[in-house]
Image (tube, grey):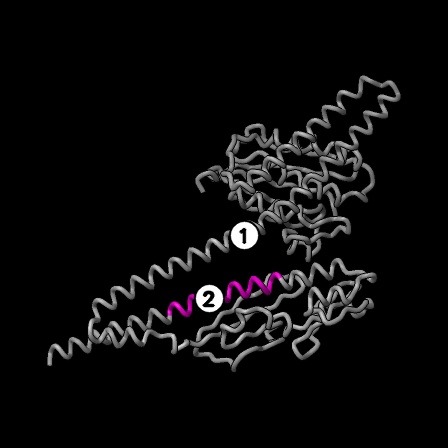
């Protein structure tokens, strides 16, 4: 009788362990599917916003619908209709609007083509706590649930999903065999599942790493195009001025222009080298950096913009400011992007009223920089979205400068924030730690 009781207890323990392990694997797999589903929906919604930004009256509706079947139609909008960027249209459709054009999007066509949908018992896409579309069975509060907001600017949906255990996938055969040889079966099954899970995770990690690398290459390529535009424009300006002076036989002024062009070319070389290091996943080359010299170099690179805009540069950096161990090209890019934005924000000012100032304080942890300007400041929307990719207040801007700036600051383990100062303009506050190399 005692052996029978021990056998029953051991069978219950081993059977319970196998059931728990199997259910845990189902939950983890559904969690992975949910993350993939979230990423796929985010990408598709981002395509809608890109199409909306590029759409024109001359666009071919048939070509757009052939490539993106979830876009049912599009139409020009009046100013009154364009007040709201998103408007539900019923039956799992909604209008996505810009200032001039609206897209009618069918969520059924968008979601049903995603294979991960079939793995969940219930899936819904909510806007303002109201479901726009619900797929699968009825909502069950006693099963697994996942919630996550989408990061799209114009389509701030929330993805909600629930799952139920698949009881047919439990190891019933192993449970029966464990009644005879429970110790051996439990050991080998546990080892088998452990190695299988590790292999699956390794494959998934490799897949995600490749996708991340491809996305990073696209972001870096776009960023390098943005960063190269200003120095190339400056080189063209210097060379054209040198040619005019050469025609006028004013040879004494030409060397200074050529030196300025060389500085810009070296900047391009540094940016391309940085681009190559990112693609090769090379580590950061930490160097001792003097912020005063970096600031002087930035003002030299922006000499044309400063002169044309009649901008006064105010340098309040203390002479006793300690050096930083950091990446000098990144620091230069960060300051360059902030200053060029400050200059452009004051381009409509009268001569003599534009200025950009920098000051710094050092603490035991690091150095805090404050860059202020005499511009109109940022709007409430801009204060919230200034670091978001592709957000810009200028019609000719790409909206990548400040997004890249935040990325570089974070890679240096620093922080950046922006605020408006009453009676002045915008103020960017940056913090760079002394021990970033060990962070």
- Quadrant containing the C terminus is top left
Marks 2 and 1: CB-CB under 8 Å? no
Q: Based on the displayed image, in which of its 4 quarters is residue 279 positioned?
A: top right
The residue at which mark 2 appears reads as 31
Q: Which mark is residue 377?
A: none
Answer whether residue 307 is magenta in the image: no
Residue 319 x %, y %: 58, 28
- Quadrant containing the N terminus is bottom left
- In this view, the residue in front, 193 or 382, is 193
Using a 10 Å C-alpha cutoff, classify the residue at mark 1 as few (fewer than 14 neighbours), some (14 to 19) or many (20 or more).
few
Residue 232 x %, y %: 73, 35
- In this view, the residue in front, 53 or 23, is 23
Dominant SS type (magenta): helix
Answer whether residue 35 is magenta in the image: yes
Which residue is at the far left? 1
Q: Based on the displayed image, in which of its 4 quarters is residue 304 positioned?
A: top right
Q: Which residue is depicted at the point 85% across and 19% down?
A: 250
Vertical placement of 345 versus 388: above or below?
above
Residue 372 x %, y %: 67, 42
The residue at which mark 1 appears reads as 212
Residue 113 x %, y %: 60, 70
Q: Is residue 204 left or right of residue 404?
A: left
CA gap, disc 2 and disc 1: 19 Å
Vertical placement of 163 versus 389: above or below?
below
Q: Which residue is depicted at the point 67% across and 48% down?
A: 400
Vertical placement of 40 versus 394: above or below?
below
**For the magenta stretch, what is the residue range?**
24-43
Q: Is residue 213 left or right of residue 237?
A: left
Q: Which residue is depicted at the point 67% across and 61% down?
A: 47
């Amino acid at each position: 009788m005692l052996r029978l009781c021990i056998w029953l207890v051991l069978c219950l323990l081993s059977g319970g362990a196998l059931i728990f392990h199997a259910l845990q694997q189902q939950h983890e797999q559904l969690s992975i599917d949910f993350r993939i589903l979230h990423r796929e929906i985010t990408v598709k919604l981002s395509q809608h916003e890109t199409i909306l930004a590029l759409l024109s009256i001359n666009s071919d509706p048939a070509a757009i619908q052939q490539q993106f079947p979830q876009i049912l139609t599009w139409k020009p909008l009046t100013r009154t209709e364009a007040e709201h960027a998103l408007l539900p249209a019923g039956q799992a459709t909604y209008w996505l609007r810009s200032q001039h054009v609206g897209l009618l999007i069918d969520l059924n066509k968008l979601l049903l083509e995603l294979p991960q949908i079939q793995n969940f018992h219930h899936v819904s896409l909510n806007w303002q706590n109201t479901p726009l579309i619900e797929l699968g069975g009825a909502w069950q509060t006693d099963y697994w649930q996942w919630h996550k907001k989408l990061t799209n600017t114009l389509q701030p949906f929330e993805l909600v999903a629930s799952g139920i255990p698949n009881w047919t996938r439990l190891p019933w055969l192993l449970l029966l065999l464990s009644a005879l040889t429970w110790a051996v079966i439990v050991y080998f099954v546990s080892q088998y599942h452990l190695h299988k899970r590790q292999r699956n995770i390794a494959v998934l990690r490799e897949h995600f790493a490749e996708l991340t690398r491809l996305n990073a290459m696209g972001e870096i390529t776009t960023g390098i195009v943005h960063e190269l535009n200003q120095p190339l424009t400056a080189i063209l300006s210097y060379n054209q001025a040198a040619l005019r002076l050469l025609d006028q036989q004013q040879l004494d002024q030409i060397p200074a222009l050529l030196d300025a062009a060389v500085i810009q070319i070296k900047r391009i070389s540094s940016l391309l080298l940085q681009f190559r290091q990112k693609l090769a996943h090379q580590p950061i080359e930490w160097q001792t950096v003097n912020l005063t010299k970096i600031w002087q170099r930035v003002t030299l690179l922006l000499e044309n913009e400063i002169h044309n805009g009649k901008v006064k540069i105010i340098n309040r950096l203390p002479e006793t400011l300690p050096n930083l161990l950091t990446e000098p090209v990144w620091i230069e890019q960060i300051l360059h992007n902030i200053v060029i934005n400050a200059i452009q924000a004051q381009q409509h000012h009268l001569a003599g009223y534009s200025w950009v100032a920098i000051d710094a304080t050092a603490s035991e942890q690091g150095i805090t920089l404050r860059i202020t300007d005499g511009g109109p400041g940022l709007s409430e929307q801009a204060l919230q979205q200034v670091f978001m990719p592709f957000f810009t207040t200028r019609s000719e801007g790409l909206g990548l400068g400040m997004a890249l700036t935040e990325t570089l600051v974070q890679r240096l383990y620093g922080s950046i924030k922006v605020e408006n100062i009453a009676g002045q303009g915008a103020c960017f506050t940056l913090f760079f730690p002394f021990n970033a190399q060990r962070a």
